[in-house]
Amino acid sequence: MRKRLTMLRAAGTTLALGAGVWVTAGAQVNDLPGGPAVNQLNFHPAVTRIAEEQHWLHWFMMVICAVIFVLVFGVMFYSILKHRKSVGHKSQELAEPIWVELGWTIVPLLIVIGMALPATKVLVAQKDTTNSDLTIKATGMQWKWGYDYIKGEGEGIGFLSTLDNSHREMSNSGNPPPTDNYLLKVDNPMVVPVGKKVRIITTANDVIHAWMVPAFGVKQDAIPGFVRDTWFRAEKTGDFYGQCAELCGKEHAYMPIHVKVVSAEEYTAWVGERQKAMAVAADDPSKVWTLTDMVKRGESVYAANCVACHQANGKGAGPIKPLDGSALVTDANSAPMIDVMLNGAGGGSMPAWKQLSDTEVAAVMTYAKNSWSNKTEQIVQPADVMAARK
C-alpha cells in the first residue's frame, strides 16, 4: 500500500510539474490580433458582417439545442425516477390521442423551420459574390499560395505568398521559441482595401487546398481543375491570419494565409509600388544571360523558394534529397532537371514549380549547378525552360 501511495505521489508530482511547464510556456505567448488567441475557446473576433452573422447563428442554434436537450432529457429522467418499478409502478399501455401525434410532428417541424430560415439567409449571403469591387484568384499549391489580382484596382498584380523562412528554421530546430505568430508569417501578404467587397476565386494546381480566414468568416476549398468563389468585406484595418484548412500533404502546416487590410490611400500606394516592382522584374524569356548574372539571380530565387527544404548548404534534410553533388543537377543535359522543376517528382515530395517564370526556373537551376561543390560552369537559359513548357 505504501509503495502504491509513493508511486501515486510521484505521478501527481510529475503531472503537476508538466502542467506548470505548459502554463509557463503558454504564458510567454500572447494573443495574436487577427489570429489565434492563447487558450482560445470561441470564434475569432469578427471583422466582417458575414462573420458576425455566423457567430449569432452559432449561439442561436446552440441555445435552441440546449433548451431541447434540457426539456427532453429532463422529462425522460423525471419519468424514469418518478415511475420506476422499485416504488410500485407497473407498465401499462396508454392510448395515443391524435393531439399527441400532431404535437410531436408539428412542434419539431416548426423548430426546424425556425432554425432553417436564418441559416439559409446567412448561407445565401455568403454565396453572393456579385458587385465585387476587387477580384483576386487564390491558387493553392504545395505548399504556398499564389495571388492574382484579376479585376479592380491593382489588376494584373500577381505574386507568391510563402511561409517566412525564419519560421521554417524555427520549426526545423525542434525547439522553437515562443512566438505570437508562429508559422503564420509570410513573405508577401495579400493586401486589400478596407470597406471594399473582395471576391476570392479559389483553385489549385496539384491537390485540394482550402483558403480560410476565420476573422472574415471565410473558408473555401481550392480544387484542381475547378473554380470556386467566396467573398468578404473587412470593416476595419489590420492584419488577419488563416491557414490552409484541407490536409494537402506533408507540409500542410507550413501554408499560412496573411491578409493585410489597409486604408484606400495605402492600398493605392501599395498597388503603385507593386506595379513598379513587376515592371522592373519583368524578363524577356528570349534574353541570353551571362553565367554571373544568372547565378546572382538564381541565388535570390533559391533563398525565397528552395532553402527551406534543401538548406542553404544544398545538403537537404531527411527525405529531402541534396542538390550538392547530385547527378541530376550536375548533368550536362538539363532536360531531366527542367522536367522535375516543372512537373515535380517523388509523389509530391518535390513540388512542381510551374508558377515560377522561365527566367526564375533557369536562374535557380544555374545557381544549383554552380554552387557548393557543383562547379560545373553550366548555364540554363530561359528559352530552354520555355521550350520545355510546350
Image (cartoon, helix red, strand yellow):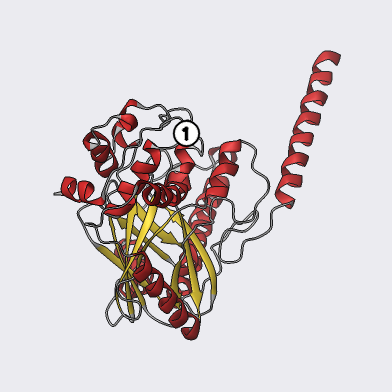
Q: Residue at x 51, y 39 (%)?
A: 312
Residue 105 can be seen, yes or no: yes
Q: Would you call the spot at circle 1 few (<14 residues within 10 Å), some (14-19), or many (20 or more)?
A: some
Residue 355 can be seen, yes or no: no
Tell which of 257 and 188 is nearer to you. 188
Tell which of 82 and 3 is nearer to you. 3
Tell which of 314 and 61 is nearer to you. 314
Q: x and y percent of residue 261 in the render?
A: 49, 74
Query: Which amino acid is tagged 1?
Result: Trp
Q: Is residue 237 left or right of residue 133?
A: right
Q: Residue at x 48, y 85 (%)?
A: 265
Q: Is residue 200 above or below residue 18?
A: below
Q: Is residue 289 above or below residue 54?
A: above
Q: Residue furthest bottom?
A: 265
Q: Residue furthest right?
A: 2
Q: Secondary structure at mark 1?
A: loop
Q: x and y percent of residue 2 in the render?
A: 86, 15
Q: Is residue 15 left or right of residue 131?
A: right
Q: Is residue 242 above or below residue 116?
A: above
Q: Residue at x 40, y 33 (%)?
A: 375
Q: Quadrant of the N terminus?
A: top right
Query: Where does label 1 land, which residue?
Result: 372
Q: Residue at x 25, y 36 (%)?
A: 334
Q: x and y percent of residue 277 in the render?
A: 41, 69
